[in-house]
Amino acid sequence: MDVVTIAAGLDFSGLLADKVALITGAASGQGRAAALLFGAQGAKVVVADFNDEGGAETIKMLEEQGSEGLAVHADVSVRVDVDAMVDATMERYGRLDVLYNNAAVQMSGRVVDCTDDEWDLTIATNLSAIFWACRSALPHLLAGDGGSIINTASTLGLIGSEGYAAYGAAKAGLVLLTKQIAVEYGPAVRANVIAPGSIDTPRFRKVLDSTPGAQDFVEGLKRTIPVRRLGTADDVARIALFLASDLSSYVSGAVLPADGGLAVYR
Ligand SMILES: NC(=O)c1ccc[n+]([C@@H]2O[C@H](COP(=O)([O-])OP(=O)(O)OC[C@H]3O[C@@H](n4cnc5c(N)ncnc54)[C@H](O)[C@@H]3O)[C@@H](O)[C@H]2O)c1
């Protein structure tokens, strides 16, 4: 088959038709963008978040574009909530094909400044939650016809960065957890990581608001990014769609940077 024949056979609509996707942190930012894109590609989307208002808004946006979704209240730092969000998905839709662990908390602090409470909450939200969600979802993903797990790390989980002790440790931990899942549960389930760089989401804006000289900081930051701009939630959502769908059928255990080349530069 030559390239033209392969291209002619590709259909980029309905990539997630008949699939059910559970996305954590889908009340905002990257999670919401993925929810809308997955919905537009035919998935039924479970929007899990502890921000109920934002979750309801995502569902409204899904419905407005003709997609179907279910909002589930879940604080992913609490194990019973994580198990319950998977149960709620199965109860409503009877299947689960894509688990996208995107929710996270971002607290900064160097090692000696990081309190036990900050450490525990960061590890619970950004690492244990992913373990709990995968453990709970895997039997359902395995029962289907090809499951995909997508876990969100960060550039800060791949390299050291001043002041992100707990966050970096948790994000680095989930990278290996994901590879572990890829090894243990392939071929039925593929598991991959997205490592965003600087993505212009509400979270990013919040950090900027508390940064003196934020505009200069952003301009300086852009100069260190080979594509010379911040990322958008949609940039990341398209990578997530690739990993969720059969477009990435031969990709597992991978870490895909969503950083405009930032990690290469550093
Ligand atoms: N924005 C960036 O520059 C950037 C860079 C690297 C990595 N990331 C990662 O990308 C992911 C998405 O971030 P974003 O920028 O879209 O942020 P965001 O703040 O816009 O969205 C995060 C969502 O997660 C939810 N959330 C947080 N803690 C939760 C909890 N305990 N239980 C349930 N929901 C919870 C929030 O309510 C929110 O809806 C995160 O994993 C983050 O660490 C972001």
Image (cartoon, rainbow, N blue to C red):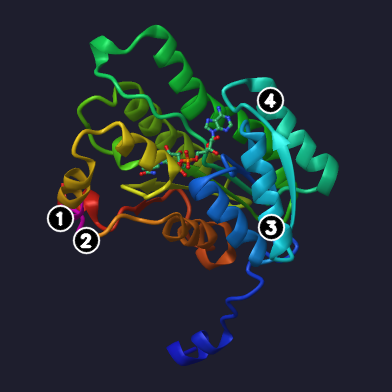
Q: Could you tell me if the residues under marks 3 and 4 are in contact, i.e. CB atoms within 8 Å?
A: no
In the picture of the structure, the residue carrying the numbered disc 4 is: 81
Q: Could you tell me if the residues under marks 2 and 1 are in contact, i.e. CB atoms within 8 Å?
A: yes
The image shows residue 157 at horizontal and vertical percentages of 33, 35
Q: Could you tell me if the residues under marks 1 and 3 are in contact, i.e. CB atoms within 8 Å?
A: no
Q: Crowding at label 4, few (<14), some or many (≥20) Cα neighbours within 10 Å?
A: many
In the picture of the structure, the residue carrying the numbered disc 3 is: 62
| Front tag of 3 and 4 | 3
Q: Could you tell me if the residues under marks 1 and 4 are in contact, i.e. CB atoms within 8 Å?
A: no
Most prominent secondary structure in the magenta stretch?
Answer: loop
| Front tag of 1 and 4 | 1
Q: CA distance from mark 2 to mark 1?
A: 6 Å
The image shows residue 221 at horizontal and vertical percentages of 19, 48
Towards the viewer: 234 or 125: 234
Q: CA distance from mark 1 to mark 4?
A: 41 Å
Reading the chain from its start, which is encountered first: label 1 or label 4? Answer: 4
Q: What amino acid is at disc 1? A: Arg
Where residue 63 sits, quadrant-wise, is: bottom right
Reading the chain from its start, which is encountered first: label 1 or label 3? Answer: 3
User: Does the stretch in magenta take in 170?
Assistant: no
In the picture of the structure, the residue carrying the numbered disc 2 is: 228
Q: From this viewpoint, is residue 94 visible?
A: no
Q: CA distance from mark 1 to mark 3?
A: 36 Å
The reply to whether the residue tagged 4 has its Cβ within 8 angstroms of ligand 1 is yes
Q: Is residue 16 left or right of residue 161?
A: right
Q: What amino acid is at disc 4? A: Asp
In the picture of the structure, the residue carrying the numbered disc 1 is: 223
- The span shown in magenta is 222-227
Residue at disc 4, secondary structure: helix
